[in-house]
Image (spheres, coloured by chain):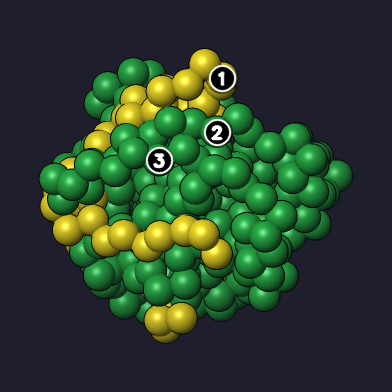
Chain colours: A green, B yellow
Amino acid sequence: MLKKDILLIINPNASKGKGKSKAKEIKALFQKHGRACTVAYTRNQGHAMSLAFRGASYGYSIIVAAGGDGTVNEVASGILRSGKDIPLGIIPIGRGNDFAWIAGIPQKTEEAVALIARGNVSRIDVGLCKGPDHPDGMYFLNGAGFGFEPMVNFKAMEYKRLNGMPSYVVAFLYILRHPPKPYHLKLVIDGVEKDIESQQISVCNGRRMGSSFMMAPKAEIDDGVFDVMFTNYPLSGALMSPIRKSFLT
Amino acid sequence: MNAERVDILSDEAVVQAHCDGEVYTRNGRQFSLTILRRALGLVRGEKI
């Protein structure tokens, strides 16, 4: 039986619909580095997680997510749910690629493949978010949030002809004109309660969200802490100024 | 920026949201966030 080496999980519709040709390119690049690569295509939301779960159980040495932060989260979730200590590799071909950026993954596919082929693994922190829809929890690598920031993200996903930063800029301007209602939040952090009215909270493992927002400039993915960013109501023009500044940095 | 930075040092922080409007999270109106320290191996590059 052949030893399982690298499992590549990729959305065939990723990279502006060129996922299949991208997969062939990536497989050939791995072969140039002397690594055997098996390709698995995702079919729908959640499929990347089940593919990663099975891949980890089958004993692949590295499981690679080719896509954006959503695909990366799903693949990481599958690995973690398997209970196997299999490392994750990332080839950033998604919309925002925020986690890949903070992880120091090259944007160029050839360089990302070379990095994975070298296989220098380090350990990182992971978030687990539990709620009514997901009582077992959803893992996240880069961050979790609600209010303004995820609204921008969801809006950006509606723009099929825009990708990366332009889609977030347009979505940002739209949500700026249609901001969320303030939420009454009770935060319990280290046993200390805090009541706030807020339209925005981001729990960050990484620094950047939405391709350009530097939400938590001091965050590190291996420091053992989240950086929690929230705004007090109202999300005024004065408050928006530094957000715009960080967006354009 | 009228925001605060808080490091969660405990293993679980609970966030509760009470409002009449829609909460834009895929995880419902009440959720808990837990940090799993160094739980995953990652093939990563140089630190940014």
How many residues crowd mark 2 within 10 Å: few (<14), some (14–19), many (20+)?
many
- Counting from the top left corner in percent of width and height, residue A90 is at 47, 61
Reading the image, the residue beneath label 1 is B21
Q: Nearer the viewer, mark 1 or mark 3?
A: 3
The residue at the point 16 percent across, 50 percent down is A190
* Up/down of B16 relative to A56, above or below: above
Of label 3 and label 2, which has the lower sequence position? 2
Q: Chain of mark 1?
A: B
Which of the pair A171/A166 is nearer the observer?
Answer: A171
How many residues crowd mark 1 within 10 Å: few (<14), some (14–19), many (20+)?
few
Q: What amino acid type is highlighted by mark number 3?
A: Ile
Q: What amino acid type is highlighted by mark number 2?
A: Pro
Reading the image, the residue beneath label 3 is A196
Q: Nearer the viewer, mark 1 or mark 2?
A: 2
Reading the image, the residue beneath label 2 is A182
The residue at the point 40 percent across, 40 percent down is A196
- Counting from the top left corner in percent of width and height, residue A243 is at 64, 62
Q: What amino acid type is highlighted by mark number 1?
A: Gly
Residue A14 located left or right of residue A158: left
Is label 2 in a helix, a strand or a loop? loop
Q: Give the quadrant of residue B45.
A: bottom left
